[in-house]
Amino acid sequence: MLRTQQSNECWRVDDWVSIDGTEAEIVYQGQTVARGTIDGVTADGSIIWVRDNIGDRKLYERCDFFEVWVPTGNTALDYKVSRTTGQTP
């Protein structure tokens, strides 16, 4: 499943492959370290690029224990979850 844990406002995304173009927060050890748009994802989902609101772009690797959290109201992500798992969000 693409989404696993839910906070009051966000879902943690475990499968990074299908989140390209999604607004997200990058979390490390429980702290938000970046916010922006997922601007690229490797084919295996191990690396993402995030573009922040001023246009800076940064790379994050799953092996470094970063987490990606997306807003619960993200209808584009709900569509992607439905398409990839065949289940309704």
Image (cartoon, grey):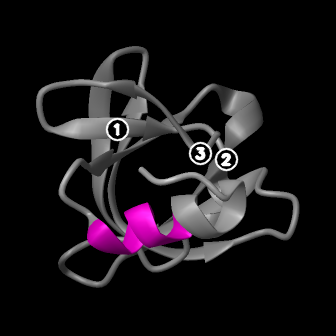
Mark 1 is surrounded, within 10 Å at the Cα level, by few (under 14), some (14 to 19) or many (20 or more) other residues, namely many
From mark 2 to mark 3, how far is it between C-alphas? 5 Å
Residue extending farthest left: 8
CB-based contact (under 8 Å), mark 1 and mark 2: no
The percent coordinates of residue 4 (x first, y second) are 50, 28
Q: For this rendering, which residue is in front, 43 or 28?
A: 43
The residue depicted at 66 percent of the width and 59 percent of the height is 86
Point out the image quarter for the N terminus.
top right
Residue that numbered label 1 is attached to: 11
| Mark 2, secondary structure of its residue | loop
User: Which residue has dot 2 on it?
Assistant: 15
The reply to whether the magenta stretch includes residue 79 is: yes
In this picture, which residue range is highlighted in magenta? 75-80
Q: Can residue 19 be seen by looking at this rendering?
A: no
Residue on which disc 3 sits: 2
Amino acid carrying label 2: it is: Asp
Q: Are marks 2 and 3 in contact (CB under 8 Å)?
A: yes
Q: How far apart are marks 1 and 2 (CA)?
A: 12 Å
Q: Where is residue 83 in the image (x, y as percent from the top left)?
A: 63, 70
Q: What residue type is labelled 3?
A: Leu
- Mark positioned earlier in the residue sequence (1 or 3): 3
Q: What type is the residue that disc 1 sits on? A: Trp
Q: Quadrant of residue 10?
A: top left
